[in-house]
Image: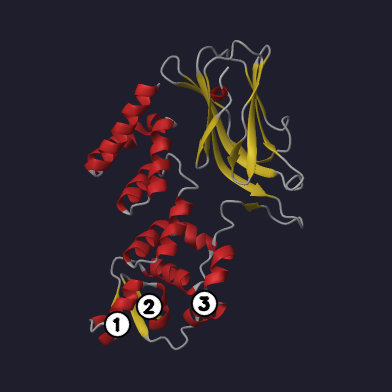
Amino acid sequence: MTDNAYRVDTTSRLAQWRIDNLASCSYRKSDPFKIGRWNWRLVLEKNRNLFIKLFPELSSSNKDSPPIVSFIIRVVSSLGGRKALVHPEIRDKQLKSSDDFVWALEVPLTGKFIIDLEFLDLKTASPNGGESSSVWTDGFTQKDLRATALSSLGKMFSESIHTDIVINASDGSIGAHRAVLAARSPVFMSMFSHELKEKEMSVINISDMSIEDCQVFLSYIYGNIMDQNFLDHRLHLLRAADKYDVMDLKEACHESLLEDIDTSNVLERLQNASLYHLPKLKICCMQYLVKFGKIYDILEEFNAFIQSADMDLVSEVFNEVLSVWKGF
């Protein structure tokens, strides 16, 4: 038995355990795999039925905060054209031990199959009995922005204190401060340092952003962006960060977009990864589509993607598909 028999492959919020042969044993526990803050294990037990168990490995440091998990789990058989058995979606279930989630399959499985586990959310219970919070939305802003922006900057922006430049978005205008914009963006610095119309007229026209997107972008620059606003506007923020060379925002968007890839957004994420040169996001999207087989779940959308996407990107996807087929 090789070590590969126990390895679980992961990307973003997805885990897959490939089983080549279960006939020789009645019990198998996977190697630990990390999703969110926890190491997880999958267990197979074969008796009259096949039982699949999922549980976190809790240590002394996290035993008092077991995860509250939402997920979808499937068993995909290679026989008969990738037939799948799907467990009903699990929502907000706290898992502490190997007995907290047990799936009994009455359908006999022979040959190769894949256990496909997609995490929809991971939460931790509040220590004071309050509402649980997602480990994926507690945000970079609470941790990082405190170190890079003073709270007074946010007040200057939100209360329009001594603003000295107007930004015209596609559907509205907002006041800002040259010094703050120049300090955060080399592009704005260049505008105000040379004899350009922005310096002379004290106006910046950003016609490719709505006023709402512009406000969220400026909220980031001033250090008082809200986590949910960041999540809701990531793609617009990514475009603005790339255009105005705000590299810390671009990287924050890059890291965040890695966390919740699914079939509804993977093709859009792949296009943006190619457009804005985001290598980790590109690799994860490719793996999600090809290595983890999700391309079969969205064939109609993928056919439309082929018709409209950059041909070099389409070629990369097909080359990845060919390399996986050769190795299978």
- Report the residue at 72% width, 33% height from top: 100
- Report the residue at 34% width, 68% height from top: 244
Please identify the quadrant where the C terminus is shown: top left
Q: Look at the picture and state if 205 lies above or below 307.
A: below
Image depth: mark 3 or mark 1 in front? 1
* Quarter where residue 249 is shown: bottom left
Residue 305 in the image: x percent, y percent?
Answer: 29, 40
Assess whether mark 2 and mark 1 are in contact (beta carbons under 8 angstroms).
yes
The residue pinned by badge 1 equals 193
Q: Is residue 69 left or right of residue 256?
A: right
Q: Dot 3 surroundings within 10 Å: few (below 14), some, or many (20 or more)?
A: some
Q: Does dot 1 land on a helix, a strand or a loop?
A: helix
Residue 204 in the image: x percent, y percent?
Answer: 30, 77
The residue pinned by badge 3 equals 154
Query: Residue type at mark 3?
Result: Gly
Assess whether mark 2 and mark 3 are in contact (beta carbons under 8 angstroms).
no
State the separation of the CA atoms marked 3 and 1.
24 Å
The residue pinned by badge 2 equals 182
Q: Is residue 132 left or right of residue 78?
A: right
State the separation of the CA atoms marked 3 and 2.
16 Å
Q: Dot 2 surroundings within 10 Å: few (below 14), some, or many (20 or more)?
A: some
Q: Does dot 3 land on a helix, a strand or a loop?
A: helix
Image depth: mark 3 or mark 2 in front? 2
Of mark 3 and mark 1, the one earlier in the sequence is 3
Q: Residue furthest front?
A: 2
Q: Look at the picture and state if 139 lies above or below 223.
A: above
Q: Does dot 2 land on a helix, a strand or a loop?
A: helix
